[in-house]
Amino acid sequence: MKVKLRNNKVMFKNVLFLIVTLSLFGLQSCDSQIKEEKKPNIIFFFTDDQSYDTQRDFGNKVTKTPNLDVLADNGVVFSRHYNTTAICMASRANVMTGQFEYKTGCNFDHGSLGTKQWSTSYPVLLREAGYRVGFAGKFGFSISDTNEGWGEEGEVAKHDFDFWGGGSHQTSYKTIENKYMAKYAAEYPHSTRAYGAASIDFINESVEKDEPFCMSVYFKAPHRPVEPDPMFDDVYKDVVFDKLPNYGREAGEHLAKQSRMGRQYPRFVEWGYSEEDTYQEALRKYNQLIYGVDYSIGMVLEQLKKLNIDDNTIIIFSSDNGYFNGSHGLGSKVLPYEEGARTPLIIVDPRQNDKGQRTSALTGNVDITATILDYAGVAIPSIYDGKSIRPLVENPKGNIRPSLPIIQVWGPKATHCLTVMDDKYKYIYWYYKDESKNIYPTEELFDIVNDPYEMKNIASESKYRSELIKMRKLYDKQLEHWKKEGVKYNGYKKYVSLFERKLN
């Protein structure tokens, strides 16, 4: 009997151990499931006027962007990312709403973003879905149905954010001059670092509340005026920057005459790109501004690690338009050539196993909006022109869109044009005509894969006739979309007829 009783005790202990083990396993499974279902945090870093070639991961050997390099090493780098309008006001409205400019009705020469378009912006939809949303930096466009101008756009937008450190119009590099950032001025007198500090405050508040968050940091840098943070004055001392193969006036002589009719042409000289010594100084200051951005991003990344939330925070980095920096003998941006419209894009999903990937898939600024909503588990509105880039983060060899437009209807009408791209070619149609100056409607076709610096217009070459016809069809399809879905106000309707091709 004693032996039998002893065996029963052993059996009881084994059964009890099994029950406890299964219970603990069940609890761990539940915890794991809860962790997997937890909504990711999202941080969107957005610069102003940053050329695609300003980082080491894009091939620049002398720039110093250590924190952006970390993002590139841990995420996906997009080598063919474009802004569908390459100027800050329109681009920022595109990014907020996921819609092309002719559907937002928003640009400097045209008018404000309508309240209808703003109602389906990513900050509004995220907040409705339970996210805390924050903003710091250059908001850059007005929200109004009556085009009332710049005075109140920050006041309108800030009510849709849980945290607001934004500023109207261009904002200032002096932190003290930005109304909602002034409290950071003593410790962070330059606004670029102040935006990092403000982001950290918002993140800390969100963690304390145990709520998922989306922080948008829209830096002013490296936009002019040239006022880099003095803290980094020695970063590029005596550094010599290489010029791209399409640098200089000779590299722009083959382009459409219309491309030389705007402010981009004189700025090659006015902004110091035409002479070696002033070119190098311009590039040093420009990249110093970007270094400040990199430093600010590093501040935020360090805080995410301290809070132990870096493993559930999506990071998106891009810019609102590119910058010529002397390419094709041009300065500034706006025009649809690569240096004006193409920008960096890096997306980091820490939950992905594959790190340091690169994709050549075609993407646009309107896609960022849909991507943010996709990661947050929020339905993407059918009105959006953008598509989620998330599938490319998960499979960099894929594609999400067959074509993408670049819209240019700002500034002198001679420079107005419509562009369409596919995975290999770029087609530009310049409608403007001035017989007195020997300027006529012109089309350009570039093989971006084999001629990434757009040094040869192949539109008139017979061997590319089939490619030209294909791109014309894509162009006509895009213009038809403008006709059907574009706003009928703020001067956009006229372009449906102006941009009709007159060449066959």
Image: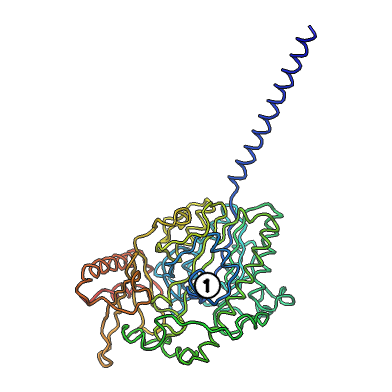
State the image quarter where residue 274 is shown: bottom left
Which is nearer the eye, 327 or 6? Answer: 6
Residue 266 drawn above or below residue 167: below
Relative horizontal placement of residue 459, taking residue 154 as reference (left or right): left
Furthest residue toward right? 2
Where residue 399 appears, as percent x and y from the top left, is 39, 57
Quarter of the image with the N terminus is top right
Where residue 461 appears, as percent x and y from the top left, is 22, 76
Identify the residue under disc 1: 55
Mark 1 lies on a secondary structure that is loop
Q: Residues within 10 Å of mark 1 (few under 14, many from 20)?
A: many
Which is nearer the eye, 360 or 483? Answer: 360
Relative horizontal placement of residue 399, taking residue 20 as reference (left or right): left
- Identify residue type, mark 1: Gln
Residue name at image x 55 percent, y 76 percent:
63
Quarter of the image with the C terminus is bottom left
Where residue 455 appears, as percent x and y from the top left, is 34, 79
Relative horizontal placement of residue 307, taking residue 108 as reference (left or right): right
Which is nearer the eye, 381 or 279? Answer: 279
Residue 464 drawn above or below residue 273: above
Residue name at image x 70 percent, y 56 percent:
307
Where residue 38 appears, as percent x and y from the top left, is 60, 47
